[in-house]
Each structure stands twice: as C-alpha cells, then as structure tokens.
Image: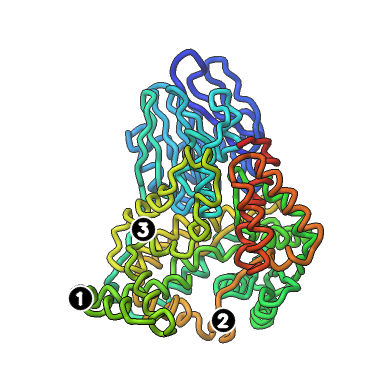
Amino acid sequence: MSGICGWMGFGGDAPALIESMAQPLARFDGSTVQALHAPRSAVAVAAAPGSAHVHQRDGLLVAVWGHPGVSDPVLAERAAAQGLASTLAAIWLQGKAEAVAQILTGGFSVAILDERSGEAMLAADRMGIQPLTWQLAGETLVFASSADALIRHPSTPPALDHQGLYNYVYFHMVPSPGTVYQHQQRLMPGEYLHYRQGRVENKPYWRMQFQENGKRSFAELKEDFLGHLRSSVKEAMGDAKVGAFLSGGTDSSTIAGMLTQVGGKPADTYSIGFEAQGYDEMEYARIASRHFGTAHHEYYVTPDDVVAAIPQIAGVFDQPFGNASAVPAFYCARMARADGVTRMFGGDGGDELFGGNERYAKQHVFALYERVPRLFRKALLEPAVFNFPGGERVRLLRKARSYIEQASIAMPARLETYNLLGRYGPQQVFTDEFLAAADIGQPLASLDKTYGRSEAKSLINRMLALDLQITLADNDLPKVMKACELAGVEVAFPFLNDAMVAFSAELTPQQKLNGTQLRWFFKEALRGFLPDAIITKQKHGFGLPFGVWLQQHKALQELATDSLTDLKARKVVRGEFIEQLVGQHLQEHAGYHGTMVWVLMMLEQWFRQHGRTA
C-alpha cells in the first residue's frame, strides 16, 4: 500500500528518519533513508533535499505534502523565492511551532524533525484532506500518512483495537482520532502535534469560528460568494486535465457549471447511474449538463461491477470503511481516468459549510420543543400525551409521543436515535468476548466531546462543526480520495478552499437554515445560475442499491454469504445475528438491513485484504 512514513527518536537508534517511495530524502548519522511510496493521489515531495517542499540543513528536516499554499503575502513571496520548506524552517527556528501550521492553506500535511533540540512537529490541514497517523513507541515518535504505512515500522507492529472495530460498526467508519489499531492515533483537522523529549502534546491551531450576527447585505454576500467560487475552481485547476463528478445535486452541479465558466470550454463531467427504481438520478445530471453545456460522460454500474470492486475497495482503505458510495465513486473516477483526466473535482463540503443535510431541518423541529416552558411540558403536556387511555391506537398521539421522546434526548445523542447498531442492540450483534474489550458508550461520548468543542451559539452551526469532522473529514473525504486513488487520479475539493470556508462562517444561522429551508443563502445566491430543477430537488447522490441487488444477483449473494460466514469464525459478531440478518431481516426490508450486511461484509473483506485476524 502507498504511504509516507517517518520517525523521530533519541537514544540508541537513528535520531530521525523519514521514508518516501520516490527517492531518499536525507541521511542522519549514517542511517540511510529507505524507500516507501508516496500516495498516488498526493503530490510527491520526496525529491532531492532543497526542493520546494523539502528542507534539510544542520540536523533540521522539514517536509510538506499535498497542495499547500501560504496565507501571508510576505511569507508567500519568500516561499516562492526560497522554497516553502525553507520558509517553514525559519519560522520553526524562531520557536513558533503553531505558526508553522497557521500560515499554511489548502490540503497539506507537514513534518518537522529537529535533531538538535530533540523536537518534532506534525500538522494536518484544516479540513482533514491530508491525514497523518502517529504512534509513540517508547520515546520514539512514529508517523505516517496511513495506518498501513505506520505498521511497517518494526516498533509498531499491528494489534487490532476492539474499540476501533466497534466504532466502525457503529459509524460505518472509524472516527478520528482513533484508528483500528491499538495505540495509533490520527491528527484531527486543524491540529498539530509537538514532540519533546519522548512526549507529545496535541493542540488545535485552527477551529471554525462562526460569526452568528452578520450584518452584510445579501447582494454583497452573493458577490463575494460567486467570487470565491470562481477563484476556488480556478486555483484547484492548476495545470492538470480536470474533470468533475456530477450527481445532479446542487454541489456537484455548481462545481461543474463554474468549471465550464472558468475554463472557457465545456467541462468534462462524469455521472453514475443504476438500473434500480428509486436509486437512479441520472436525469438530474443530464439537466445540469445540458444547462451548462458540459461534455458529459455516463456509466451505469451493475451488480457484477460491485462484486468486482468490493475486494479492491476494501484493500485501498487503511481502516475498515463501510460507505457503499465508494463503489460508484470509483467507477466514476475510473471512467474519467480512461479519458485522460488526472484530477477530479468533488463537490464535498457544501452541505457542511452551507447547511444542506436533511437532519439539520429535522433537529430544528425537535429543538422547538425546548422553547415550551418546562413546567407546562412536565406537569401538563407530557402526562396528557403519555397517559391518555388507548393512546397507542391513536395515530396523532403516537406521533406526539415519538416526537416528545426524541426531542427530550440531548444533542448530539439525538442524532443517533435511529443508529442501526443501536436499533439491533450491541449485545445482540457482538459476541460477549468481543464486547469485553470495547466500551459501547464510547461512540456517543466521542460525539459529545467533538460537539462540545465548538463555541457556536446556534444549533445549526454546532451541527455543522460536528459534521465537518464526523461526516466530512472521517467519511466523505476518505471515500472520494481513496476511490480516486484506486482509479489513479487526483481529487480536489473547491468548496474546501480556505477563503470559501471562512466566507461560510460569516453567514448567519438563518442564512444556512431558514426555518426548515436548507442552505437558504446558497440556493438563493445561485438562483439563475443553477437550473430550478436542481435547486428544488431532494438530496440523493451516488447511493448504491446494494440491498435490492443482493436479493436478485447470485454472485453478489455468494460474496456476501461467503464473507459473513468467515466473519462468524472471527468471534467478533454473533453467528445467530448474522443468520437472522440474512435469513429474516433482509427479507423484511432489503434497503434498511442491507446496510448492515454491507458494513459487516466490508469488515470481513478488509480483514482478508490486509491479512488481519480479529
């Protein structure tokens, strides 16, 4: 698997070492830097020492990966003249570890190894586009761009973490900072790590600061927004041959339209369809393509395609990953690669910046209950609703009870009311032996911790801050980046341009969620640019009809059955649950229960592809 790897220690072994697959970066005290591989989706910076992204001098090594920029104009000019890594080295030598990360923009990861002072620093970008994984082995800091690269170091042999596996089944991915391996951690977006004398300290260098009481006019905001959109797309284009994902939603359509406008020619757009009722949204992609005049390319994914992709998808992820949309994203990117496209544009981030997820409106409705005086709720309303004779037979009362029950759950736990694992019950899904080494309360505790970090006053902004981490950095970005890596193309996310992110924070809560109207400002600002049919459509995306196909396609059934049978032997999931899931639940509701079949199947496939035992 691809990755970068490095370590920093003081004692018997080499004091500092970085590896990257292109060519050696440096030598330290006679220790030769060996060869690993830089990610296909990243900019390889393992060039000769002294290149724009590598600085090595007098025991100090600075290396930067990704597509970094510099926020300060004076420092940007210096970086252009002297090299980015050399500029960061000068800031580091002034004792400004946090400032090194603060001046960088875009998607990046940076490592500084200072042999003289016995210090090191790692940092990941603000949105989590370029991740870093690390582990402290004794007094040695080991770090890498992925868990796969990290476990290659002899001091960090892989040992699976039951908590990480449990969190995967709960969230359908492993949320950071945890990983699926014991003692491994990932840097959070906007976080840096400072290593000194065998100890590490993690601190945020950036957090989303929402301006809740903006006073700017709509016209002024619209002008700025469109300007940021154009510059973000232009900046992301670079010199690459660019294409764009096009699902027909507001985000992908906006990027496709702006790419055509900025590029001065029809943009190459790529869409995926499914021959399954209720899943195919190709017509919306065609509406957007016709409206903007893009050069449109389509592919219909089949059940056979899914069977062929599953082992590959499981293999490319360094953590178990259960978002089935990775499959259509892969086939979309592969289609683009066959056309010579080297960089794909994704519309990811629009929902989390401008308020586009359906749950935001739903939670707003639940939050209204908090405005009802507590005395009235507890003394009159709730007793009347819950104690009404025969109330379970009255539809309106049943709905009122359900509403009150959900509205009474504190955020962010209320977001997980319909969590699939919670519905089944952890004790019904997992073996006792497995649960003995996992805390079933940890997922909600981690959500609460992340939710509590935000200083936002409004509910919508607190949810956006949470989703920037849980939905975007831990789920959507890895999905698209790994799918593109597997297809052999880069990916860029124009909405995640730092200026666009900062602009979104200026919008008031009502401009994001106006009553129950999602992304109000975004849609109004793009009215006339986007087709009306796109603005008013319901959100969907590249959803995969796995549960439906699972009932009809023999090869898919065999792969799923074979995977779940082998998973039983690992003593992680109860055999009786798997039998009930496949033999009963799936027949009752293929779409709903098919999700858990997929999650468990991909867990087993990940075990196989990575040679792991539970």
Tell me which label, 3 or 1, sits earlier in the chain.
3
Quadrant of the drawing holding the C terminus: top right
Q: Which mark is residue 472?
A: none
Residue kind at label 1, given as amino acid type: Ala
Residue kind at label 3, given as amino acid type: Met
On the image, the x and y values in percent for residue 535 come to 54, 82
Residue at left offset 32%, top offset 63%? 410
Left or right: 284, with 532 as reference point = right
Which residue does the numbered mark 1 point to in the structure image?
A: 379
Which residue does the numbered mark 2 point to in the structure image?
A: 537
Residue at left offset 59%, top offset 46%? 573
Tell me which label, 2 or 1, sits earlier in the chain.
1
**Of 558 and 538, which appears nearest the observer?**
558
Which residue does the numbered mark 3 point to in the structure image?
A: 208
Question: Are circles 3 and 2 on residues that touch, CB within 8 Å?
Answer: no
- What's the distance in space between the residues labelled 3 and 1, CA to CA? 40 Å
The residue tagged with tag 3: helix, strand or loop? loop
Among all residues in the image, which is located at the extreme top? 12
- What's the distance in space between the residues labelled 2 and 1, CA to CA? 42 Å
Discs 3/1, front: 1
Packing grade of label 1 (10 A; few <14, some 14-19, many >=20) is few
Residue at left offset 59%, top offset 63%? 346
The residue tagged with tag 2: helix, strand or loop? loop
Residue at left offset 36%, top offset 47%? 205
On the image, the x and y values in percent for residue 175 come to 48, 49
